[in-house]
Image (spheres, rainbow, N blue to C red):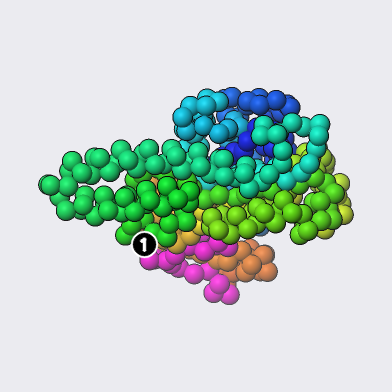
Amino acid sequence: MKLGMVGLPNVGKSTLFNALTNAGAVSANYPFCTIEPNIGIVSVPDERLVKLKEMYNPEKFTPAVLEFVDIAGLVKGASKGEGLGNKFLSDIREVDAIVHVVRCFEDTDIIHVEGEINPARDIEIIGLELIFSDIEMIERRIERCKKLVKGDKKYSEEAELLESLKIHLEEGKPARSYGFTEQEAEIIRTTPLLSAKPVIFAANLNEDDFRNNIETSKHFRTVCVIAETEKASVLPICAQLEAEISDMNGEDKAMFLSELGLNVSGLDRIIKEGYSLLGLASFMTAGPKEVRAWTIKKGTKAPQAAGKIHTDFEKGFIRAEVVSFTDLMENGSMAACKEKGLVRSEGKEYVMRDEDVVLFRFNV
């Protein structure tokens, strides 16, 4: 999973990126501090995997990973090249989902590129730049369809859909709120629309509001209303607190989070939201050689899941020997689970589940 972090300059985006990844990206109080995208790879926290590690004491331990891309601050006119905007937009095109950091805190010491704090305006600026870029792409595709329509009826249907989508975008609405049918979604899938990407609005609050006043913060409420309209998710966060948490050891971090009334850090919450938005799940393989998590799309069948490990596993798939993580923990070993009939033999039509611990049998 690759998440692109976007936002106007000086909204706390790079501060949050550093806190989440400990990647050491430059963070400063001036626009375009970030020019080349910074990339941070983080392990996906998974207590189940840790328990499997304790059970098997493997030679190798491999959690799932998440890639954060800190994309430079966008400004009004980015789709026309303002502020190196075209390059930044192309960086966004490469990610699976967008974490849009929105400034919801007042601080006279930190300048705002637009002069004042206004989350609705900030969201609109970036949203419109993505939409403008999409409109240009759709116009080019419409022209192509019109040239091909005489030879194939399917291009006529595609052109009609694109014309309708263009009207939707010209009303300032993102592609993700269009409401595609399954057939339409299949048609549009080959067009990498920026405004169709899933979005998490990370509402960056000051410490006091995050600790005590999230629900009464007018800026946060504004972001929530927009998120509902745009079919996006919203996550309250405090970049400064996350920066403090990132420097703590496990015990101090747990105590600090408890004081905040939280069970998990901002990183954990963003990962959970990202998995949900993208429809992802994890299955696990475990043994003395390696304990590992594998990320798949929900609905993936056993042979395709096996193919995540190696293409030969998918080609020569025979069966999947599956036990639930809960049953494995309760019984202490795979052998004990087999004795009790808790290890299932699943075939090619089996749809993988999030808590599956699997051994694939294959022949090539």
Residue 313 locus on image (x, y percent): 40, 51
State which quadrant residue 6 falls in: top right
State which quadrant residue 333 falls in: bottom right
Q: Which residues are magenta?
A: 340-364
Horizontal side, residue 305 vs residue 182: left or right: right
Residue shown at 36% from the left, 39% from the top: 137
Q: Is residue 246 above or below residue 345?
A: above
Near mark 1 (Cα within 10 A), the count class, few <14, some 14-19 or many ≥20, is: few
Q: How many marks?
A: 1
Let me know if residue 152 appears in the view. Answer: yes
Q: Is residue 3 above or below residue 49?
A: above
Say which of 17 and 247 sits in front.
17
Say which of 330 and 131 sits in front.
131
Name the chief secondary structure element in magenta.
loop
Horizontal side, residue 72 vs residue 205: left or right: left
Residue that extends furthest to the left in the rendered view of this protein: 151
Let me know if residue 254 appears in the view. Answer: no
State which quadrant residue 142 falls in: top left
Residue shown at 41% from the left, 41% from the top: 134
Q: Amino acid at mark 1?
A: Thr
Q: Confirm whether the magenta stretch covers residue 348.
A: yes
Q: Which residue is mark 1?
A: 181
Residue 186 locus on image (x, y percent): 33, 54
Instruction: Provide the secondary structure element on which disc 1 rests.
Output: loop
Residue shown at 70% from the left, 25% from the top: 30
Residue that extends furthest to the bottom in the rendered view of this protein: 340
Q: Confirm whether the magenta stretch covers residue 211.
A: no
Residue 7 locus on image (x, y percent): 62, 38
Residue shown at 81% from the left, 51% from the top: 209
Residue 117 locus on image (x, y percent): 72, 41
